[in-house]
Each structure stands twice: as C-alpha cells, then as structure tokens.
Amino acid sequence: MDDCCQQTPLFTFGVIADIQYADIDDGFNYSKTRKRYYRSSLELLRNARESWSESAVKPQFILQLGDIIDGFNKEHNASQQALDSVLRELSSSPVEVHHVWGNHEFYNFSRSVLLRSKLNSTLHVDRSFTGAQAGGEIYAYHFSPFPGFRFVVLDAYDVSLLGREESSEQYATALKLIKLYNSNEDLNCPPVRWSLEQRFTKFNGGFSKDQLDWLDSVLSSADEKGEKVTIVSHLPVHPDSTDPICLAWNHDELLDIIRSHFSVVCFMAGHDHDGGYTRDKQTGVHHLTLEGVIETPPCSNAFGTVSVYEDRMVLKGKGRITDRVFLFP
Ligand SMILES: Nc1ncnc2c1ncn2[C@@H]1O[C@H](COP(=O)(O)OP(=O)(O)O)[C@@H](O)[C@H]1O
C-alpha cells in the first residue's frame, strides 16, 4: 500500500453480507458443497460490530448487503425473533446501518411488512431522505455521507416472484419473464447449467423500468455535481464478479446505465457467498461481491472496512475478505 493509506481518510464505512442468522444447527447449501453456520453467524456479526466500535476511525455507517436472517426462520416461526437478535447486535453500537434486501428477507416477510420494518433504512437512519427515494413500493434510495460522495441502495427484487402477492400485477409480470427462460416446474431450479441464463431462477429478481429510470436520473444529477457514486444491491450485475447463477435477471440493463454515467466508481453486492471481483474493462468501475458470513467458519470472519480518499477507496478485509484498493476511474 502506498502513502495514501497513511493519510486520514475522508470517511470510512463497514460492509457485511449474507449473515443469514437462524437459531438452528449447521447445515449445507442446496448442492451440499458449502457448510452453513447458522448460529455462529451471529457471533461473526458481533466480531464485526466490536471491531468497528474499537477502530481508531469509527465507520460513519454500515452497509448490510442483504439476507440478514435465513429463510429457515419462517418454518420455525422465528422470523421476528431472529431479526430482533441481529438488529439488537447491530444497535449495540450507535453507527447507522443501511440495510439492503435479499431473497431471504422475502422468505421471512412480505414486501409491505418490510417497508414498515426496521429493515427499511429510510425510516430509521438519522437523515432526511426527502426526494431521495425511488417511490412506490420500490425500496431504493440514495444518500450522501460526505460532500462529493453518494451511495445508492437498489432493490434487486423489485421484479420478482418473492415478496409480491400472487394476485398482483407485479407478480404476473415477473412470472411471465421468468417463464420465457425457465420451463422447470420448480422455478428455483436453474433452466440451464452453463450459460448466463442460469440466473432466471425464483431466488433472483430484477429492476423495474421505474427503478432503472430513477437510477438514471440520480446518476445524471451526480454526474453534473461531479460526485463519486457507489451502488449497492443484493444481486451482482457484472458477469465477471460472480457465479452467473447469482446475477440479477436484467443485470445487462443495469450495467448499461452504469456505463453511461461517469460518476459511478463502485458496485457492491452479496448473494454469491464465495464472493468475487472484477474491474469493468469499459469503464474502470469496480464490481465487488462480498463473501457471505453464513458460509464462513466460526474460526474466521467475513466483514470489511472501507476507507475513502479523494482518489480511491481502500477495503481492509477481515477473515476471508481480501484487502483491495479501488482506484477511482
Ligand atoms: N439448484 C437448485 N435447484 C432447486 N432449488 C434450489 C437450487 N438452488 C437453490 N434452491 C432453493 O432456492 C432457495 C434459495 O436457495 P438458498 O441457497 O437458500 O439461497 P441463498 O444462496 O440466497 O442462501 C432454497 O429454497 C433452495 O432450496
């Protein structure tokens, strides 16, 4: 690392993904290739929170990249209890948390319940979001924690079979789309094994035209102001930053928007518990997929602290999170 990292950062923030806490014994992912540590994930969250609390430069905020509790809580009637446990852990330090929504949020709660819950950060963080939200039932908003820097939280399940009433127009639209690619009876089962079309599963989703238009206008305004924008979403959008089975349905449309605005410097996601990273060749935008807490052994960790400077962001990872430098394009 060069001299930059000896300087005091403008601000720092924490990142953590796929905690998927449940008070149940360890298990495995669907294909039985990765162990899942459901109880230990709360301890790993505690490690992250303690490390952030004790750090010399306190993070200004935390980005929780989605899937904070596991879908298994629903069948144990323990959704609210599990959510209370992780939120209690997070709230034992005063730093504000920006929650992203993933598929496991929708296994536990409906969209309307989530919109009224503590996982709707627009209701609970200590700043005004007037005019900053996408509107309607879309959980997307932006905030500026420091002059010249903006963060956009996206709703990757805006078009989805999850969280929508089966009788709703949105459900019908999502069903029509997924069925164009996936003819399996079980829509969680991917339609193909190797191509990008694997992503058309029920555990993924996409961004509506309303949300894409909103993002486009937020980024146009950021371009004009000369801001540096980091976008966060549960689902990754760059095929080289993840296993393609984890990509957002219309990842290509989202990428096109990012590529048409020079303000974007970084895109952060969760969902793929093995993590990933690429730098987009066309724009130099960094695409980080953060390794998931749930598949991290109790002896390790999975969180990071990002220090932001004028010309770069520096990720200091703990446990299996790799240190990285994101030079601004
Ligand atoms: N290949 C697959 N075929 C059928 N169902 C699957 C497949 N992969 C995952 N699922 C199911 O999809 C849901 C979400 O999978 P899960 O592994 O819990 O997601 P995540 O990776 O977000 O934790 C679960 O109900 C799981 O059983």
Image (cartoon, grey):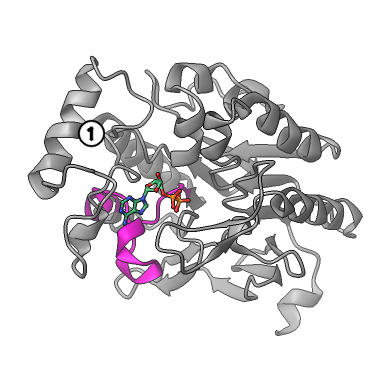
The disc labelled 1 sits on which kind of residue? Lys
Give above or below for 276 relative to 308.
below
Image quarter of residue 137: top left
Residue 281 seen by the camera: yes
Residue 23 on image: x %, y %: 69, 41
- According to the picture, the residue beneath numbered tag 1 turns out to be 209
Tell me: residue 165, above or below residue 9: above
Q: Is residue 102 visible?
A: no
Quarter of the N terminus within the rendering? bottom right
Range of residues picked out in magenta: 232-254
Residue at x 51% of width, y 38% of height? 71
| Horizontal arrangement in the rendering, residue 263 relative to residue 99 (left or right) | left
Instruction: Tell whether 7 sits left or right of 135.
Output: right
Nearer to the camera, 44 or 101: 44
Determine which quarter of the picture holds residue 170. Answer: top left
Residue drawn at 91 percent across, 56 percent down: 54
Furthest residue to the bottom?
Answer: 2
| Mark 1 C-beta closer than 8 Å to ligand 1 | no
Q: Residue at x 74, y 51 (%)?
A: 45
Front residue of 254 and 25: 25
List x then y, in percent, for residue 149: 58, 49
Q: Is residue 280 magenta?
A: no
Q: Is residue 5 left or right of residue 237?
A: right
Q: Is residue 177 above or below residue 138?
A: below
24 or 40, nearer to the observer: 24
Residue 313 horizontal/vertical position (percent):
62, 66
Residue 323, position as x, y percentages in the image = 65, 75
Which element carries disc 1, helix, strand or loop?
A: helix
